[in-house]
Image (cartoon, coloured by chain):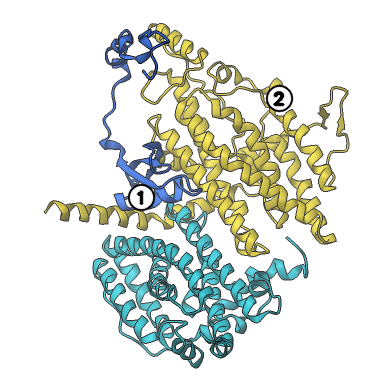
Chain colours: A cyan, B yellow, C blue
Amino acid sequence: MNAMAQEASKAPTFTYAIRQADTALILAQRLSAWIGHGPAIEEDLGFANIALDLLGQARLLYAYASEIESQGRSEDDFAYLREECDFLNVTMAEIPNGDFGFTIVRQCLLDCWRLENFERLTHSTDSRLAEIAAKSVKEIRYHLKYSAGWLVRLGDGTAESHRRVAEALAQLWPYVHEWFVEDAAESALVALGVVPAAADLREAFDKRLALILAEATLSRPADVEYRWFGKRGQHTEHLGRLLGEMQSLHRAHPGAQW
Amino acid sequence: MYTQSLNEPSSRPVEALDDAERLARFQARIDAEEKIEPKDWMPDAYRQTLIRQISQHAHSEIVGMLPEGNWISRAPSLMRKSILIAKVQDEGGHGAYLYSAAETLGVSRAELIEQLLSGRAKYSSIFNYPTPTWADTAAIGWLVDGAAIMNQIPLCRCSYGPYARAMVRVCKEESFHQRQGYHAMLSLARGTPSQRRMAQDALNRWWWPALMMFGPPDTASHHTGLSVKWKIKRFTNDELRQKFVDFTVPQAEFLGLTVPDPVLRKGDDGHYITGALDWSEFNAVLKGNGPCNAERLRERRTAHDDGAWVREAAIAHAAKRSARAVA
Amino acid sequence: MSQTQDWPLFEIFVRAKSGLDHKHVGSLHAADAAMAIEHARDLYTRREEGVSLWVVKSSDIVASDPRDSDALFTPAADKIYRHPTFYDIPKEVETL
């Protein structure tokens, strides 16, 4: 990228990094609620590992966003001192856990999208994003192995498990939509080769997911009208409660070190 | 981590006389510091004592995930959140290693978990205390894990091979737990006045329960004899408790916090002398009347029951898959 | 409380780094082999303890009986000529 392009890409890259960071953080917050409450001890450990990976990704992305912004905000400033409308996570990440099957469907959908996205980001013309993606993509590959493995077990397991994940898939499907709606900021980055094109991603996502759903004996729900755009700061009611809890201690002690 | 010395040998009679020779050979192996392995002959009382001790230890790890897990969602920085998740995750891991060691003695994990959930099995009573503030997670790491390490290091040399090996793994990971706890405590002690108050309050509440983790005083503990003879246990409760106090009091002083014991002083022999422990409280918590006994078990039961359809589905899928492979 | 059957037990073997043997580290429960690998990764390699995993259903392992130990292993004890140290070689002979 030349200097002018670099300057022009700053604001959209900041927004993009925050979107990815917030998505990872909010999803980690959701997943970590399973620790101590999973269907088997081994599953508690699995979710904990995924949550730790996601937190690590969020921290790298906040650090990069802070560099771009150069106002000295720390990762904790981003995580603990912003309001609902400042958070730009995709909506699906904030949807409450539901049962184990619901969590697995949410995870598998997000993993499919994140894997396709981060694989492409490893070739980004933005070298910092490419670095972060290269580290993250190995983790996400494992996350998908884990979540897809479970989705197949539950989809193909008993009548009850099939019913539960089929319902979860129907409920969560509408939230997939926003991942593939490019806004002006993203289109600018696509043009500069910083991020992959939405249409490209959609095709790859659909293909990858179709294979998993087939093995899980599940069918892809019909697309429905969609309202939520978490990545633009338009959230469900759930995010406020999540942040209220997550930020409570930090906010109760302004300026404290932990 | 967290054995407490409620692990007493089984009261069953040691084998009949015709086993006397095998028993003598068994004891000779123990005396020679040989490890006993799963398929070796062992007296039934040795087996039962180990099953009980290891499973209580495993249950303690699993229940022990809950009080600290309570703060994962509210951890005050992303770094602390990561550390706490990794720590609670380790506890689950320790529970799994220990169930695995117990299973080598011929009991199934399902049976052991059933004993826990039905309230028949004991676990360390320390986890029946609440964690109302963030400082409690720090105090647990520092004091509870610290006491646990003291109890557990000798178990790495326990005569039963699988238990000893599991404990080597556990102890390695446990020192991360204690250090992160002290580190978090240090941040609070050096922090704002309200952080300091939080830290002192946590020390006040965890000090005595931590001392009680070593079990009843030697004068009141009737059953240590066989455990010592079998090299399952190598030090008495009071010896370990004394060591813990001697290590921990200076650490509290470094933090600038006050140990909640008005009569605490250093004796002429260099060892600290503490006030009397309130064993009636210990016994009440052990009997199920602690502040959180019911809550902890209820949470474990809910997790188990809510997970039943998941575990069944996984088995059903595995069966279908192997049927398809055969066809 | 629901009484369901537990997942089968698997024995776990970890290769700490390439060049070393896989070593038994313990066991765990999993519904199938793929799950056993994932669980083994989460349970036994959280701190970079391994580069490769083997999982084997515990019920598939055949072990020798400790009661046969004498018959199986003690006959090797007096075959000391199998060990290089059995042979006294004059100091003058080098590189042997």
In this view, the residue in front, B140 or A86, is: A86
Decide: few, some or many residues near mark 2? Use Cα within 10 Å; few <14, some 14-19, many ≥20: few
Q: Position of residue B70 (x, y in %)?
A: 61, 57
Q: Residue at the location (44% across, 89% down)?
A: A191
Which quadrant does the C terminus of chain C fall into?
top left
Q: Position of residue C9 (x, y in %)?
A: 34, 41
Q: Is residue A65 left or right of residue B18?
A: right
Q: Identify residue type, mark 2.
A: Glu
Q: Identify residue type, mark 1.
A: Ile
In this view, the residue in front, A4 or C62, is: A4
> Residue B94 bears which disc, if any?
none
Q: Is residue A94 left or right of residue B79?
A: left
Decide: few, some or many residues near mark 1? Use Cα within 10 Å; few <14, some 14-19, many ≥20: many
Q: Which residue is mark 2?
A: B239
Element marked by disc 2: helix
Q: Position of residue B165 (x, y in %)?
A: 48, 32
Q: Is residue B197 left or right of residue C94?
A: right
Q: Residue at the location (39% across, 51% down)?
A: C2
Element marked by disc 1: helix
What chain is tagged by disc 1? C
Q: Which residue is mark 1?
A: C37
Q: Residue at the location (50% across, 57% down)?
A: A48
Q: Are marks 1 and 2 in contact (CB under 8 Å)?
A: no
Q: Is residue C68 left or right of residue B45?
A: left
Query: Is residue A165 at all visible to an observer of this figure?
Result: yes
Q: Position of residue C88 (x, y in %)?
A: 38, 7
Which residue extends farthest bottom?
A184
